[in-house]
Image: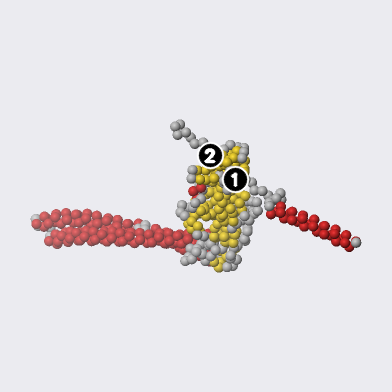
Amino acid sequence: MKNAAFIIVALAVILVAAKAWRGDSDRTASGGAGAQERETTATVEKTSISFSISVAGEITPAERVSVRPEVPGKISELPVDIGDRVNQGALLFSLDDEELQIELATRETEIASAKLQLEKARQDLDVANLEIAVESARTRLVRSKLESEKAFEDFQRNEKLFQDELVSREVHQTARTNYELAKNAIVSSERDLELAKDRLEKTRLQAQTDFELAKNLVEKANRSLDLTKDRLSKTRIVAPFDCTVLTRPVSVGQAVSGSGGFNSGTEVLTIANLNEMIINAHVNQADITRLVKDMEVDVQVEAVIGLKVKGRVERIAPQATIRNGIKGFEARILLTDVDPRVQPGMTAKITIPVASADEAVAVPLAAVFTEREGRHVFVVKGDAFERRPVEIGVSDYKVAEVLTGLSPGEVVALEPPGEDAEIIEPEKPDADS
């Protein structure tokens, strides 16, 4: 009897459990109270709407410089390393300048020698002695002319006296000889004067030539000295602006080539100004018209969770390019507030505002239906639905602004009414009116 009672109780428990399981299954299958029902209507409300587009880009420094020496040499000082912050004007690295110092001393010696030659040429240009010789020859010529005139007068007087037989033939002949000698003296003096002038002119020309050559030599020596000083100044490279060292691929003692040669030179450092960061973004051609210079945009740095900063559109490329098969335009965004956690190479998402409306009468996008006649909504009127034309303004991916046709508080359908639903059509304007 006890066993029979136990079996009866067990069967009763099993039946109750089976009934409960079947009830739960029926409720789940029929969408009972445990299932969440989908909304079919929505209330017209006032809200703020903002529509924007997003593009991705890479953060890079606004100023990034590959530091290369202009002259070849061997690294003698390299006081900075990766990550160091360097002030403008501080030493980045220097080259061994021993050979250039020797060359500088040689150039200075050449200049001193050239200046001595110039001074000698300047003195040679002063031809006072030759000018004295010319003046002396000119004086002798004048004296010879005076003596010739006196000899001629003596000759004429003796000629008349000889014809009157008042002097002897010897005296007359002596007077003639003196006159001829005086004339020859004039010719000789004139020739000496011309020779003296010719020597003076030739000496002046030679002295002038020597002076110009010496002056050119001094100028050439000065240019060589300036070039050596310029090369010497290029052995010390300083920071052109406040910067941070990004890379340093060389070490002290390594020989490097200069950028002034046949190649671009050896890269010693890469520096950048991390206080000014930019984002280079590729904006789809369909969205580029929404972007204007100096527009403020929101920037979200993906590597730093929750970090959002502001940016400003600095430049927009005037010509489209193709990247990853998409045609677009390069845009440069300047970060206006650089967070110290932002590093070069991080990816950022740029949010570009397109349109916005504050306190707009809005409905969900699902409530707006588009047909050939235009856009309309179905306003719930008890058990019926009123088809009402609307004009749509700003919309985002969830709601749309209704410019005309609705008022806050009205209820609209999110699905088209069924075939058996009563639809109230809008009144058509009277053709006579």
The mark closer to the camera, 2 or 1, is 2
Element at label 1: loop
Judged from this view, the residue extending furthest toward the left is: 164
Q: Residue at x 37, y 59 (%)?
A: 212
**Viewer-nearest residue: 172 or 53:** 53
**Viewer-nearest residue: 220 or 86:** 86
Where in the figure is residue 344, as x and y percent of width and height? 59, 57
| Amino acid type at mark 1 | Leu
Which residue is label 2 attached to?
A: 425
- Position of 363 relative to 169 (above/below): above
Element at label 2: loop
Residue 170 seen in the current view: yes
| Amino acid type at mark 2 | Glu
Q: Quadrant of the N terminus?
A: bottom right
The mark nearer the N terminus, 2 or 1, is 1
**Viewer-nearest residue: 360 or 35:** 35
Quarter location, residue 21: bottom right
Q: CA distance from mark 2 to mark 1?
A: 18 Å
Q: Residue at x 48, y 58 (%)?
A: 322
**Along the horizontal axis of the image, is 32 left or right of 416?**
right
**Along the horizontal axis of the image, is 49 left or right of 173?**
right
Where in the figure is residue 265, as x and y percent of width and height? 51, 64
Which residue is label 1 attached to?
A: 414
Quarter location, residue 383: top right
Label 1, residues with CA under 10 Å away: few <14, some 14-19, many ≥20: many
Q: Residue at x 60, y 38 (%)?
A: 381
- Position of 115 relative to 314 (above/below): below
Quarter location, residue 176: bottom left
Judged from this view, the residue extending furthest toward the right is: 1
Q: Quadrant of the C terminus?
A: top left
